[in-house]
Image (cartoon, helix red, strand yellow):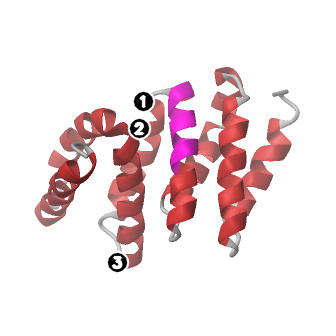
Amino acid sequence: MGDTVLPEVIPVMQRALYSSDHNTRIGACVGLTEVISCSSKEQLVKFVEILVKAVRDALCDEQQDVRKMAISAFQQLYSVLGSRVLDEIVPALLVSMDSDDERRTRAVYGLTGILTVRSKELLPFLVPRVRYFDNFLFTRGCLSFIFYLIPLHVFS
């Protein structure tokens, strides 16, 4: 995909992710997945902040169908950019775990989505970071969540 196309297409996809119509958000995830798969690593690096935020927000969407499509976009982005995607997405989700109920629920959606497709990469990344949080109850809650999800996704 050309360098002139991405600056025009990515903002359109990003805006569509915040539509009130969940079918539009699903379409935006499909579009993001295709854009990522047709772009080089060098091209994606230029837009990594926008792409990571878009994929993270889609992983946390209230609609399961949107989250399913967001997992495809996450997978594609991970396959091109590697662990940098985890480095960008997971800490923001962990911070959201220490928020109000709605943000916490959305963070759980996001982490669960990542865990379903990248558990082997996520768990070694996640556990050491959670251990060093200052808030003991928050740390305990995160670890409880992780250990609750492991049998549901890793061994299924």
Question: Crowdedness of circle 1 by 10 Å Cα count: few (<14), some, many (20+)?
Answer: some
Of the numbered discs in the image, which one, if any, rests on residue 101? Answer: 3
Would residue 57 be visible to someone looking at this image?
A: no
Q: Which residue is mark 2?
A: 87
Q: Residues within 10 Å of mark 3 (few under 14, many from 20)?
A: few
State the CA–CA distance, disc 1 to disc 2. Answer: 6 Å
Q: Amino acid at mark 2?
A: Asp
Query: Left of 111 or right of it: where is 54?
Result: right
Secondary structure under tag 3 reads helix
Disc 2, SS: helix
Whole-percent x, y for residue 60 in the image? 48, 61
For badge 1, the amino acid type reads Ser
Q: Is residue 133 left or right of residue 4?
A: left
Magenta segment includes 79 = yes
The image's mark for residue 83 is 1
- Considering the image in quadrants, where does the N terminus appear? top right
Say few, some or many: other residues with alpha carbon within 10 Å of mark 2 (under 14 / 14 to 19 / 20 or more).
few
What amino acid is at disc 3?
Asp
Question: Any magenta on residue 120?
Answer: no
Q: Which residue: 85% across, 27% down? A: 2
